[in-house]
Image (cartoon, helix red, strand yellow):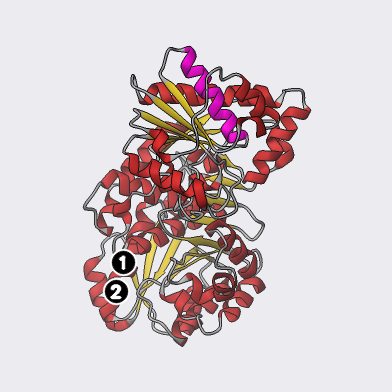
């Protein structure tokens, strides 16, 4: 589940070699894993390996030799002169007992499979010249492409396309995923990702201490809340969701219902009086309470049993919403700030950040999408447009002192201490009106059950994506809460929890 930057992966290689495993042994294992994947992809027909001049090309030579040994029709196109190869790549090329083809797009022909071993994960410059022409030719060829480590043209740490990139149907990477396997647009270019064991001892991670993980259940298993047999609803927390005015109540109801369905013992919708009847009529298990002013809201939070709050969905943009946020922060409750709550601080985000930082041990989660993120973190977005999504969210979390969750097909959650998780389980049909409101409520449910804010956000994001997968294409936001029981059952089965 750990995700390694290209620098961290290079360190894993060095530590393994220093411990006694030759680098060429790692290359042999990597190439053999590529050959296995190629055999799985195509049963017959010619295979073309397009190799670069570095270790990625060396992996390609090993794969070619292994496939040839299995009587497959294989040819190799090499970017550079064969005699210019160095180190382990040169050793691998010596194992290829056949000629290499010139680096020319016409040499590709009409293969059953192309193995892309041109560039590795460390590419940090734009692709130009002959490599650019080759990448474009591979993409236009029509044959399926198997990429080695990462599709050529993708930056391994940021996931960015460096001018042009291979569109692979499958990618074989080694030991652990890189950020680009999970971050867009890199993930889209990778196709299926296969992680191969090439002999690197996982104990090297104890020294590397990576701070990024894939957001999967193993990452937060110990924090996942499970009701006790002798428990009761009050032990599972009481979440509060702020409703907007009469014409803007639906978003808050989505969040409130999601909080209840995701495990909060009780949920109350704090509603303006003019919307009280509408909210009360539309809700059953969720309670409704009249709250018009920030003073009334602060008085409501005098009840310590109300331990998690959502502000933002349909709340309205302006001073009233800002005052409600400050009241919740002063009460030191678990707090999810979404939508209008974030936009309300667009003109003075430092006021929000200062209020968060003056709270003792703040359990605060900000949930912007890409349109809202620059309203709070314009300097991070504008001064460094080349930053990866992972880097931007980390910087934002450090700056504001809260958990920052930047939504999207590759949702990233980051903590001020540098921890981060990347989610890759959200289907495209999750991009629908109200889905973010449901996510806010689900995170609040975790906060209500005393899950730390970072883990609460990660659990909410994963369950949100799984609910969308369970509901299937055509879902609307209301469907997400209805399928959560099925998601819980799958988690309980995976964790060995009886129910």
Quadrant placement of the N terminus: top right
x, y (%) of residue 253?
31, 66
Q: CA distance from mark 2 to mark 1?
A: 7 Å
Residue position for label 1:
253
Which numbered marker is on residue 249? 2
Quadrant placement of the C terminus: top left
- Can residue 122 be seen by looking at this rendering? yes
447 relative to 355 in the view: left or right: left
Residue drawn at x 33%, y 35% is: 143
Residue placed most toward the observer, 445 or 56: 56
Residue placed most toward the observer, 347 or 388: 388
210 relative to 231 in the view: left or right: right
Above or below for 53 versus 384: above
Q: Quadrant of residue 178?
A: top right
Q: Quadrant of residue 354?
A: bottom right
x, y (%) of residue 166?
43, 44
- Can residue 499 be seen by looking at this rendering? no
Residue drawn at x 37%, y 62% is: 436
Mark 1 nearby-residue class (10 Å; few <14, some 14–19, many ≥20): many
249 relative to 12 in the view: left or right: left
Q: Main secondary structure of the magenta part?
A: helix
Is 487 a magenta residue? no
The magenta stretch spans which residues? 55-69
x, y (%) of residue 238?
45, 60
Above or below for 390 versus 151: below
Q: Are marks 2 and 1 in contact (CB under 8 Å)?
A: yes
Is 64 a magenta residue? yes
Query: Mark 1: which secondary structure?
Result: helix
Above or below for 454 versus 173: below
x, y (%) of residue 437?
36, 64
């Amino acid at each position: 589940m750990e995700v390694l930057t290209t620098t961290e992966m290079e360190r894993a290689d060095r530590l393994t070699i220093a411990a006694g495993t030759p680098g060429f042994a790692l290359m042999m294992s990597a190439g053999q894993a590529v050959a296995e994947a190629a055999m799985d992809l195509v049963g017959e027909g010619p295979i073309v390996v397009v190799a670069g001049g570095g270790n990625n090309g060396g992996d390609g030579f090993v794969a070619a030799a292994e496939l040839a040994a299995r009587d497959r029709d294989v040819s190799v196109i090499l970017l550079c002169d064969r005699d210019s190869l160095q180190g382990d790549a040169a050793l691998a090329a010596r194992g290829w007992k056949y000629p290499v083809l010139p680096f020319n797009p016409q040499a590709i022909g009409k293969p059953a499979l192309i193995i892309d071993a041109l560039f590795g994960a460390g590419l940090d410059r734009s692709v130009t010249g002959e490599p650019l022409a080759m990448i474009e030719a591979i993409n236009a060829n029509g044959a399926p492409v198997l990429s080695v480590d990462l599709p050529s043209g993708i930056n391994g740490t940021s996931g960015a396309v460096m001018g042009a990139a291979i569109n692979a149907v499958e990618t074989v990477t080694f030991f652990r995923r890189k950020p680009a396997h999970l971050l867009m647009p890199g993930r889209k270019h990778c196709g299926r990702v296969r992680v191969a064991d090439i002999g690197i001892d996982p104990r090297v991670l104890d020294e590397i201490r990576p701070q990024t993980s894939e957001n999967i259940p193993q990452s937060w298993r110990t924090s996942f809340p499970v009701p006790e047999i002798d428990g009761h609803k009050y032990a599972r927390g009481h979440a509060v969701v702020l409703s907007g005015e009469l014409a803007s109540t639906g978003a808050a109801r989505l969040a409130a219902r999601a909080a209840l369905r995701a495990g909060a013992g009780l949920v109350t919708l704090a509603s303006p009086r003019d919307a009280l009847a509408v909210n009360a009529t539309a809700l059953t298990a969720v309670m409704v309470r009249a709250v018009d002013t920030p003073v009334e809201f602060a008085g409501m939070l005098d009840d310590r049993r109300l331990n998690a709050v959502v502000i933002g969905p349909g709340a309205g943009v302006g001073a009233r919403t800002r005052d409600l946020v400050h009241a919740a922060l002063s009460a030191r409750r678990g707090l999810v700030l979404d939508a209008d709550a974030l936009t309300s601080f667009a003109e003075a985000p430092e006021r929000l950040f200062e209020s968060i930082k003056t709270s003792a041990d703040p359990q605060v989660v900000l949930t912007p999408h890409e349109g809202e993120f620059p309203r709070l973190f314009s300097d991070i977005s504008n001064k460094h447009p080349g930053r990866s999504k992972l880097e931007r969210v980390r910087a934002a979390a450090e700056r504001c002192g809260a958990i920052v969750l930047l939504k999207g097909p590759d949702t990233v959650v980051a903590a001020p201490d540098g921890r981060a998780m990347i989610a890759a389980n959200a289907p495209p049909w999750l991009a629908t009106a109200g889905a973010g409101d449901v996510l806010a409520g689900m995170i609040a449910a975790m906060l209500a059950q005393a899950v730390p804010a970072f883990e609460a956000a990660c659990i909410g994001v994963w369950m949100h994506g799984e609910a969308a997968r369970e509901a299937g294409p055509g879902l609307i936001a209301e469907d997400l809460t209805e399928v959560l029981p099925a998601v819980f059952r799958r988690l309980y089965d995976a964790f060995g929890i009886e129910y």
